[in-house]
Amino acid sequence: MSYVRDVGALARKDLLLELRARDTLPAMLLFVAAVFVVFHFALPGTPSRLETSGLLWVAILFTALLGLGRAFVPEREQGTLDGLVLAPCDRSAIWLAKSLATLAFLVAAEVVALPLYALFFHRVGGATVAAVALADIGICAVGTFLGAMAVATRARDLLLPLLFLPLAVPIVVGAVGASVVVSPGRYLGFLALYDLLFAVVCWASFEYVVAE
Amino acid sequence: MGRTFRIPLPALAVSSLVLVTTALAFVFFVAPNDANQGFSQRIFYFHVSIAITAYACFAGGAWNAFRHLWKRDPRADLASYVCVHQGLIFGTLVLLTGSIWAKISWGHWWLWSEDQLVLFLVLFLFYCAYFMLRFSLDPGPQRANLSAVYALFGVVLIPVSFAAIRLAKGLIHPVVFTRHGPNFGGWILVTYCVAQTAMLVLAYTLYRLELGGKRLDLRLRDLREVLA
């Protein structure tokens, strides 16, 4: 029970910081809108539904990267990461809380991005929304974990996309499949499996990322 | 530190030389021509055995990473790194040989429908990122931990990516064709086994060589610090 309370407190801290500083979310919103405009000009003529749903996923992935890159950078800059590690709570709670906070930002960005996509390109089906929900979990779980790794390096958040994109290939496969085929069950199941598998691995090994 | 018997490096080097030569001889003179693809199919023996060797190296890297995290074995971190390094070298060879084979068989240097090759590309990018990660950290326990965790992600990624690529293939190419029929026996099998053994022994020799060099380097640095 105290684990849930720790996670809640840590996540609330991140959300409160964002509410006061308004650093990440406006940047993500602006970025995703700008990416859609770039896509419109990058795809001459009237692109098909198949093409634009691929691009939707590129936009989501890169927008998520923007948020993920910011997740641990302030902690490192302010030197608060040491405090978090020393706090008398399970270390994996730090990862879980960060993932939840990043997930909240990403979902908030998508609440705007999906209608915008529908307005600019094609309408969004129920399967795509389900795929977005499932993919978000995987993206935030793995991305937050790798974000914590990346800020420990000299290259800082430059390294995050390099570490993250190869691991995101299965997410893209599952998500794009779910948004273009008629019966998306298999792809959604695959996304759920990915989430479960990597969430367990991240949860179990986060200890080694922050502790020495 | 228990004293375990290790095959001496010169013996390993000689045996890998002999095995690779034998494998080359088998591939070019003993194995029969493929009915469909003719002479060019012979690259199969190297391509597949190098691929399996690369997987073995990545698995070795993950195993050593696990040993580092679990048992805190001080030698495991370097062993894990050397395994991944060898895996990446063999992985590059897989991409090269696969590309050559694809060009000869299908007329294209790259085919997205070849799921093994695409899987290797994803893994290649993943393990290149491993090097980026490792080289932007200062030597120490943190570097060892982060590298080990990332190497362990690799063994989770391999089956997941494989399943994903199979899924994506179903999206575009619903028909899964088998290139090799059931007639996989006789000299083909013998040649393949020789080539596979040769590659594994070669990889192990290179691994031992690099590991020995790296350990010597570390010891030299320690000694210099003691003297300074």
Image: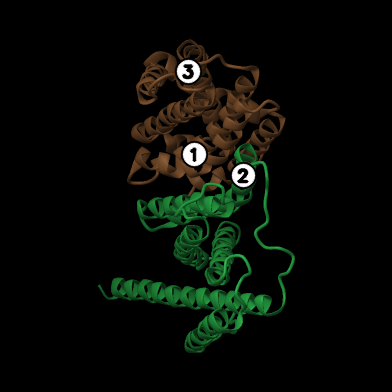
Chain colours: A brown, B green
Q: What is the number of the mark on residue A85?
A: 1
> Where does the image place residue B146, in percent across and percent down from the top left?
47, 51
Q: What is the number of the mark on residue A7?
A: none
Work out whether B166 lies above or below B19.
Answer: above
Residue behind mark 2: A201
- At label 2, the amino acid type is Val
Real-space CA distance between mark 2 and mark 1, rounded to the nearest whole angstrom:
19 Å
Is residue A86 something that shows in the picture? no
Q: Residues within 10 Å of mark 1 (few under 14, many from 20)?
A: some
Real-space CA distance between mark 2 and mark 3, rounded to the nearest whole angstrom:
27 Å
Q: Residue at x 37, y 71 (%)?
A: B218
Question: For the residues carrying marks 1 and 3, which lies nearer the camera in this image?
Answer: 3
- Do the residues bearing badges 2 and 3 touch, measured as CB atoms within 8 Å? no
Residue behind mark 3: A109
Label whose residue precedes the other's in the sequence (2 or 1): 1
Q: Quadrant of the N terminus of chain A?
A: top right
Q: Chain of mark 2?
A: A
> Where does the image place residue A102, in percent across and percent down from the top left?
50, 26
**Left or right, A4 with reference to A65:** right
Q: Residues within 10 Å of mark 2 (few under 14, many from 20)?
A: some
